[in-house]
Image (tube, helix red, strand yellow):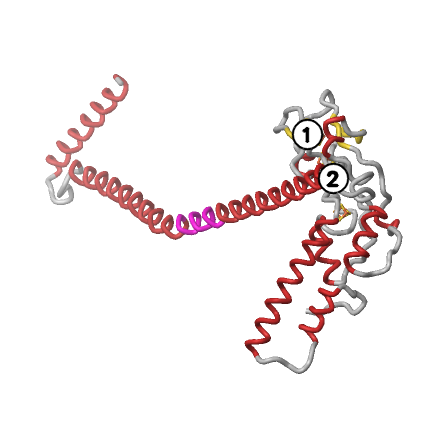
Amino acid sequence: MSVPKHISHPVLQRLRRLVVGKPKPSSFSTVRARSAARGETRSLVASIDAILPQTQCTQCGYQGCKPYAEAIVRGEANINQCPPGGDAGIHALASLLQRPYIPLNPQHGIQKPKQVAVIDEQTCIGCTLCIQACPVDAILGASKQMHTVIADECTGCELCLAPCPVDCISMHSPPVTAISRWRYPEFALHAPAGPLDVQAANIARERHAFRLQRQAREQEERARKLAQRRAASATHATTQDPAAEQAALAKKAAIAAAMARVQAQKAATAPRNTEVVSPAVAAEIAAIEARRAQMKKTDDSAE
Ligand code: SF4
Ligand code: SF4
Ligand code: SF4
């Protein structure tokens, strides 16, 4: 693990000493040191994540607030990539990490007042694409049915706007009930964070974590079912061949037996020793054959 030199937070300085410090510790000490380093890394990620707004909007370039926090600790991301957090967020991160303040990087967007998504229910076609995009499961609905946003849970991330095929989602100022919980970013970091702000961010974090767990479970379930189907079709293929082969053999044998019966019937009814009989007997046999043919013709026409 490499610890970036430009980060001066005491936890990171300890991490750096643990990772690159000398003299080289014994193997047992190394394991303990690495374990301690991992614990401190987790703790620092949690501290950074606690500052981030939890809208899970991905504007920072990462798949949510926690991945961004992890990227900061790894030294991959700077502290000015979160538009919802704005200046206040950058100051808080700079203070935590003992780094100088730098202004918000406009490449990641601009800070905007808090808004929530509203669905025009008359236009919604019930395609569920917005549900799949919402990082905190704030949209209710089912396939081919009208969808609606739970305003109190909406973080204003805008991730549901782009996927909607009929453009029936728009952003609006939050209703009073939502404002009561969602005061971020206008107040949350500028003023001492009140319990409601903390609660809102915590709820959004939990909802996002729950969604990730659910998606992982669903993916596992899909993979398990696919493996089961593949195993079943493989078993079917291996057991199917002998059965099909046996059926084909049985069919062949039945046809052969039927043909043998026909041949036997023909042989039984065919006149025998016709070559060695006298002309008179041959003539009698011929007459019998003619009568038999005539009788068969009469039978056939009667049917
Ligand atoms: S609020 Fe958005 S931009 Fe800020 S850290 Fe979270 S996901 Fe990234
Ligand atoms: S409803 Fe839309 S804007 Fe609100 S949290 Fe979900 S995806 Fe984001
Ligand atoms: S994406 Fe748009 S049309 Fe589809 S369910 Fe959501 S709101 Fe309705």
Secondary structure character of the magenta stretch overall: helix
Q: Residue at x 32, y 45 (%)?
A: 247
Q: Is residue 301 magenta?
A: no
Q: Image quadrant of ligand 3?
A: top right
The image position of residue 100, as x and y in percent, is 86, 59
Tell me the amino acid under the disc marked 1. Answer: Ile
Q: Looking at the image, is mark 2 or mark 1 earlier in the sequence?
A: 1
Q: Residue at x 70, y 73 (%)?
A: 17
Going by the image, does 244 lie left or right of 141?
Answer: left
Residue annotated with mark 2: 194
Q: Which residues are magenta?
A: 227-236
Residue positioned most to the bottom? 23
In the picture, the quarter occupied by the C terminus is top left
Q: Residue at x 76, y 26 (%)?
A: 175
Label 2's element? loop
The image position of residue 26, as x and y in percent, is 58, 80
Going by the image, does 41 lie left or right of 241?
Answer: right
Residue annotated with mark 1: 150
